Amino acid sequence: MTESIGAAPLRHDWRAEEVAELFALPFADLIFRAQSAHRAHFDANAVQLSTLMSIKTGACPEDCAYCPQSVRFDTGLEREALLPLEQVRDAAQRARAAGATRFCMGAAWRSPKDRDLKKVIDMVQAVRDEGLETCVTLGMLKTQQAKKLKEAGLDYYNHNLDTSPEYYEDIITTRTYDDRLDTLEHVRDAGIKVCCGGIVGMGESPMDRAELLRQLANLPEHPQSVPINNLVQVEGTPLHGVDPIDPLDFVRTIAVAKIMMPASYVRLSAGREEMSEAVQTLCFLAGANSIFYGDQLLTTANPAHLKDLALLEKLGMAPEASPKYSDLEPAAAPSPEAAPQARSSRCGRNTAAAGAS
Ligand code: SAM
Ligand code: DTB
Ligand code: SF4
């Protein structure tokens, strides 16, 4: 357990100038503030591991300019129908054996049809039965659909704001920012934990990054999980070839997210395959405490899981044990060199504030 430096109250009234001031801090001051905020809520040496699986791939009717799965772009991706339940169960078993505590299932849909939702609910129940937390990302959700997922025991729903309201229309035209906020409200109201973040490195301005974080932090509750994705550029998508973000600006985005939403897990998400270990380490220092773990994201590559375990070990960090199924033994890490699992990422003194807002 690391030292807690004290928890400030969670805020939902961030002004644009305040966020700009955080981004403008000298790098060392910013990282110090983010690490201090992080230690007030979490064990700074534990990282939550989530494994992703694409349960329905490609042929999506939406036009998200970053996405290889849109039917509108020729990315050479082979479309796949909704996977059979057994294939999902097998993957969940493997993820748990490798040390993941959450299994996230993604579908390339605008929104789920009710008959598909029934099949996803079977998957959620099967994954739960394997002792993993569950997360799904299925596109826009209606109130009743969110309620059904909650009844099935779903832990998290991932639905990203992606970018600032101002830059949004340059990226997606087939659904609005308000549509996204509506889905988040339905998920929250159903009592499902919210996983919501965005993507940087899409040619957005620094102000767009600040505004994305302001939108997230000023939601009625801070999302319990905040994925910050670095754009994975895929040939055939409109954003292929865009100027990448400076890695230090990526780290700054993580740090400001942690300062604004200190009790939330900030996930260093897509884009790690292209990122050096040094930059990933700076992200952990800036308060990132969750990663996608497994050799594949949805349709693109992620670092090999043994490489990730080796990096954590080098840093004296450990995968977080399952917070929910503490009756189960933590899964054995597959490498004898791998870091031992921490019991829990939460810092004992401030668990009441953590995750609530
Ligand atoms: N179709 C559903 C939706 O969009 O809500 C769920 C799946 S979608 C692939 C989930 C999220 O993945 C997107 O909101 C976006 O933030 C992220 N994403 C997709 N393609 C990406 C890419 N090339 N690089 C980084 N993040 C990406
Ligand atoms: C999120 O924020 N990032 C994940 C997950 N939520 C669903 C998706 C990343 C996708 C990267 C591109 C791909 O592999 O297709
Ligand atoms: Fe479809 Fe989701 Fe990709 Fe957008 S991000 S094109 S909604 S799969």
Image (cartoon, rainbow, N blue to C red):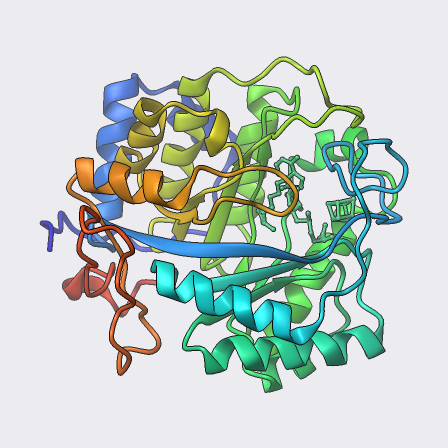
* Residue at x-position 27% and y-position 57%: 333
Q: Nearer the viewer, residue 235 or 22?
A: 235
Q: Can residue 356 be seen by looking at this rendering?
A: no
* Residue at x-position 33% and y-position 20%: 25
Task: Quadrant for residue 349, please give it.
Answer: bottom left
- From this view, report whether residue 191 is shown above or below residue 41: below
- From this view, report whether residue 282 is shown above or below residue 119: above
- From this view, report whether residue 233 is shown above or below residue 42: above
Percent across and percent down for residue 177 are 75, 46
Q: Can residue 199 be seen by looking at this rendering?
A: yes
Image quarter of the N terminus: bottom left
Q: Nearer the viewer, residue 10 or 116?
A: 116
Q: How many marks?
A: 0
> Residue lying farthest bottom?
151
Ligand 1 shows up in the quarter that is top right
Image quarter of the C terminus: bottom left
* Residue at x-position 48% and y-position 82%: 129
* Residue at x-position 78% and y-position 39%: 77
- Residue 10 lies left or right of residue 60; in this view the side is left
Percent across and percent down for residue 203 are 66, 19
Task: Quadrant for residue 139, please give it.
Answer: bottom right
Percent across and percent down for residue 265 are 39, 53
- Residue 27 lies left or right of residue 337; in this view the side is right
Percent across and percent down for residue 51 are 48, 56
